[in-house]
Image: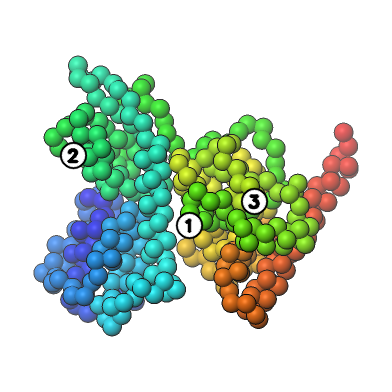
């Protein structure tokens, strides 16, 4: 059995009943019927309903458990512990690091679900003399069990199967069942259009010098870094000598989804509403010499949740994504700071980071030009 909310609740209740603080608990996922989730039977003897858990937490947890982040179980338990040990209003503290992370994971799952619904196309096949409908999709997260009941309500009149690498869902007009996922079955392969969550790199695409990556705006219809944030970004880039001709951005949903401000959101509308998978496709297409991640959300999309902006901002790193990689401020975050010393200092560091990136990039491009002259035609 795949890890799910019901199993987590049993384990968490047992831990709470024993008074086990988060720092003494380590969660390990095991795919299959053995492992951590079998421990639920042993913990159930200790279990009792935890008091004071707000409904909002349950709703958050239902989405967060679908995320692929391995640390989600520890995060959920840590928040649950704090809610039941003196911080009943914790979820209202939007500046709290645990709450912020929990809601960020929730939003990533919601976006992935919306992408699936936008891209999903069932195709009719005949199997054993009966009409059936099939679809294939590669989601970013483990959302099939969460979204399948909605698909039943939306398509109740015909039988269908949704295939993904993680889970298969089947509806026979009476019962919804699940199987472990995998490659598309041969009997369905001929009729299914493979709806991937990101586009494939174009052959022969021109290499870009710089790729800027920023988080999507709250309003997904609005381009990233519009308005005052976009103006600030353009000014700072210009002062660093990073002109528009030196940077190129392609959004992962295809050629028709380019940002006016030259910034790629880690999540985008429709089929491109992915994070890690979409970024991999874009980087493979653009092949940048340097990547600049604007803000912690963009940085963690590349390097994972272990990345800490306050420790590594402005550092030039050699990553698998690009020869040069740097994280710096999100211009919107700079503008959210109160006017005065805090905002002025942030802008100074922001500009210094981009000047450092520009100097690194110029050095590499100059070296490339010299090497070409030495090699000759």
The residue sitting at 48% across, 57% down in the picture is: 218
The number of discs equals: 3
What's the distance in space between the residues labelled 2 and 1, CA to CA?
Answer: 34 Å
Foreground: disc 2 or disc 3: 3
Q: Using the image, tell me which numbered label, if any, was put on residue 176.
A: 2
Q: Where's the C terminus, which quadrant?
A: top right
Image spot of residue 374 (x, y percent): 88, 43
- Could you say where residue 134 lies in the image, as x and y percent from the top left? 30, 29
The mark that comes first in sequence, 1 or 3, is: 1
Residue that carries the numbered disc 3 in the rendered image:
261
Instruction: Return the residue at label 1.
Output: 218
Identify the mark nearer the N-term, 2 or 3: 2
Q: Count residues near mark 3 (Cα–Cα under 10 Å), then give few for <14, some for 14-19, many for 20+.
A: some
Residue depicted at 22% across the width and 21% down the height: 131
In this view, which residue lies farthest toward the front?
Answer: 227
Q: Position of residue 215 (x, y in %)?
A: 53, 56
Res. 327 in view: no
Q: Give the image quarter of residue 180.
A: top left
Callout 3 secondary element: loop
Q: Nearer the viewer, residue 117 or 146?
A: 117
Task: Please determine whether, in this image, residue 145 is positioned above or below residue 24.
Answer: above
In the image, residue 185 lies at what x, y percent? 31, 28
Spatial distance from mark 2 to mark 3, Cα to Cα? 45 Å
Q: Residue at x 60, y 43 (%)?
A: 258
Which circle, 2 or 1, is nearer the viewer?
A: 1
- Residues 330 and 77: in front is 330
């Amino acid at each position: 059995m795949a890890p799910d909310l019901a199993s987590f609740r049993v384990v968490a209740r047992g831990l709470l009943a024993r008074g086990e603080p988060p720092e003494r608990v380590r969660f390990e996922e095991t795919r299959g019927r053995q492992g951590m989730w079998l421990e639920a039977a042993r913990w159930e003897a200790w279990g009792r309903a935890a008091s004071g858990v707000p409904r909002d937490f349950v709703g958050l947890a239902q989405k967060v458990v679908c995320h692929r982040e391995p640390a989600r179980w520890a995060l959920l338990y840590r928040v649950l512990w704090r809610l039941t040990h003196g911080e009943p209003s914790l979820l209202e503290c939007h500046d709290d690091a645990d709450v912020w992370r929990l809601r960020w994971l929730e939003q990533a799952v919601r976006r992935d679900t919306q992408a699936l619904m936008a891209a999903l196309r069932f195709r009719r096949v005949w199997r054993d003399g009966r009409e059936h409908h099939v679809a294939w999709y590669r989601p970013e997260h483990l959302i099939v069990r969460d979204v399948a009941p909605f698909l039943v309500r939306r398509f109740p009149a015909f039988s269908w199967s949704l295939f993904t690498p993680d889970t298969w869902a089947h509806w026979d007009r009476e019962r919804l069942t699940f199987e472990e996922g995998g490659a598309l079955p041969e009997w369905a392969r001929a009729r299914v259009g493979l709806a991937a969550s990101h586009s494939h790199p174009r052959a022969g695409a021109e290499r870009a010098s710089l790729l800027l990556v920023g988080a999507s705006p709250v309003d997904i219809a609005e381009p990233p870094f519009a308005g005052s944030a976009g103006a600030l970004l353009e000014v700072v880039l210009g002062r660093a000598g990073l002109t528009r001709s030196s940077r190129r951005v392609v959004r992962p949903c295809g050629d028709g989804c380019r940002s006016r401000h030259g910034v790629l959101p880690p999540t985008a509308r429709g089929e491109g509403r992915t994070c890690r998978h979409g970024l991999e496709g874009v980087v493979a297409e653009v092949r940048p010499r340097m990547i600049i991640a604007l803000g912690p959300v963009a940085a963690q999309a590349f390097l994972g949740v272990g990345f800490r902006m306050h420790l590594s901002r402005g550092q030039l790193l050699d990553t698998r994504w690009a020869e040069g990689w740097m994280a710096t401020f999100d211009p919107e975050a700079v503008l959210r700071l109160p006017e005065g010393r805090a905002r002025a200092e942030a802008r100074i560091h922001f500009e210094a980071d981009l000047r450092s990136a520009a100097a690194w990039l110029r050095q590499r491009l100059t070296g490339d030009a010299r090497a070409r002259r030495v090699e000759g035609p």
